[in-house]
Image (spheres, helix red, strand yellow):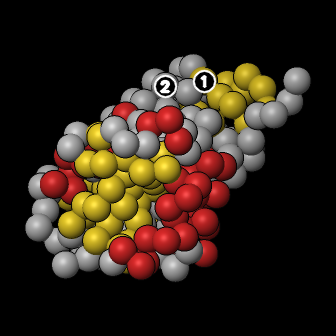
Amino acid sequence: MPRVVLIGAGDHARVLVDTLEGTAACQLYAVLDKDDAHAGSTLQGLPILPESSTLNNLREQGVSHFVVAVAGPRQASLRRQLFQQALQAGLQPWTVTHSTACISTRARLGAGVQLLARCVVNTGARLQSNVIVNTGAIVEHDCHIGPHAHIAPGVCLAGGVRVGTGAHIGVGAVVKEYVSIGDQALVGAGAVVIHDVPAQAVVAGIPAKPLRIRGAA
């Protein structure tokens, strides 16, 4: 049975532990955290190990797979960085699928995607690597979700929506069919998006309107 580590010891990691404990497909080995002060404690029964000194030694301990366990509107760059570091350490991404997730057999899933409780991914959808489809989110037919993007709880993406690399669609947002969300864009919680969103833009409201560009003063 594959041994899996979680990278990150925050709240999202707790959700992932619950999800992965519900399957017999893998063995959870430990949680890695960048704060070495947390080493020696536990997260929901799993030991927390220091990320900096442990990642490159995990293969020797029989660990073969990893899950990036950080999330949130400002975490896309960190999630991408951790994903690449784990690959470089010789580990493989583990796909997380909750037992209540409804996933079409005609959807295409990239490496290390996370499909959480009661989410829906419909026919023709394409999810690239390290994507999160969080609790109760709906990804309708023919959507294309770029790598490291996060579709937050309760989001509804209508058919044919495109979400760029590292974008974050906030809790409960709705995106109209065939709208494109640019790379690293952020859609605010509860927004209703009816027009394309440029890369790195922050939008919110009903209908969603631009607020600023991420990283701009």
On the rendered structure, is 19 left or right of 92? left
Q: Position of residue 25 (x, y in %)?
A: 17, 71
Which residue type carries mark 2? Ala
Badge number at residue 167: none
Whether the residues at callouts 2 and 1 have beta carbons within 8 Å, the answer is: yes
Residue at position x 53%, y 42% from top?
36
Residue at position x 42%, y 30% from top?
171
Quote the CA–CA distance across marks 2 and 1.
7 Å
Return the residue nearer the eye: 72 or 47: 47
Residue at position x 50%, y 35% from top?
37
Which residue type carries mark 1? Ala
Badge number at residue 204: 1
Q: Position of residue 107 (x, y in %)?
A: 34, 71
> Circle 1: is it few (<14), some (14-19), or many (20+) Cα within 10 Å?
some
Residue placed furthest toward the front: 40
**Residue 193 quadrant:** top right
SS state under label 2: loop
Report which residue position mark 2 lands on.
189
Q: Position of residue 1 (x, y in %)?
A: 19, 78
On the rendered structure, is 157 left or right of 106? right
Residue placed furthest toward the right: 217
Q: Is residue 108 visible?
A: no
Position of 63 relative to 31 (above/below): below
If the image is split into quadrants, where does the C terminus sit? top right
Return the residue nearer the eye: 134 or 6: 6
Q: Position of residue 131 (x, y in %)?
A: 47, 57
